Amino acid sequence: MTVQADIEQKLAETLTPAHLEVINESHMHNVPPGSESHFKVVIVTDAFDGVSRVRRHQQVNGILAKELKEDIHALSMQTMTPDEWTARGGQVMASPECLGGSKHDK
């Protein structure tokens, strides 16, 4: 199973989302073709009702602890309730361009 499929399965089973997108953004970064290291997750679920944005992100990080430790270099999240998703018009924010660089460049 791919890293992307693992992420999708875990989030779907745990949070029962009304909407879920797991977008592999690795191609936007300086990684080999076919990499699965940079992801954006857009998740809309009633489970986030009354939960702060920080706690939502902590929940997702907890669900994906193995992937974050072993596979994922970067994870961007848009975590919303169905009402927040509707108010946003079902729009996903665009990701910023990679600025490149590395800790080895310093």
Image: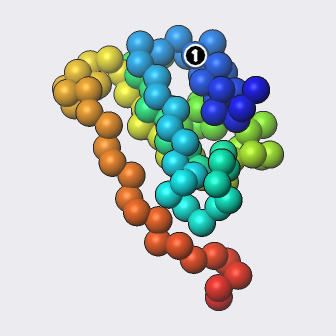
Residue 80 shows up from this direction: yes
Please give the name of the residue rendered at 54% of the width and 54% of the height, measured from the top-left corner.
27
Please give the name of the residue rendered at 70% of the width and 35% of the height, measured from the top-left corner.
3
Q: Position of residue 103 (x, y in %)?
A: 67, 77
Could you tell whether 7 is left or right of 77 in the image?
right
Instruction: Give the number of marks.
Output: 1
Scheme of image coloration: rainbow
Q: Position of residue 71 (x, y in %)?
A: 75, 45
* Residue farthest along the front direction in this orientation: 33
Quadrant for the N terminus in the image: top right
Along the viewing direction, whichever of 20 and 26 lies nearer the viewer: 26
Q: Secondary structure at mark 1?
A: helix
Amino acid type of the residue tagged 1 in the rendering? Ala
Could you tell whether 17 is left or right of 14 in the image?
left
Residue 62 shows up from this direction: no
Please give the name of the residue rendered at 55% of the width and 42% of the height, measured from the top-left corner.
24
Q: Position of residue 69 (x, y in %)?
A: 77, 46
**Relative to 54, does residue 18 appear above or below in the rendering?**
above
> Which residue matches tag 1?
12
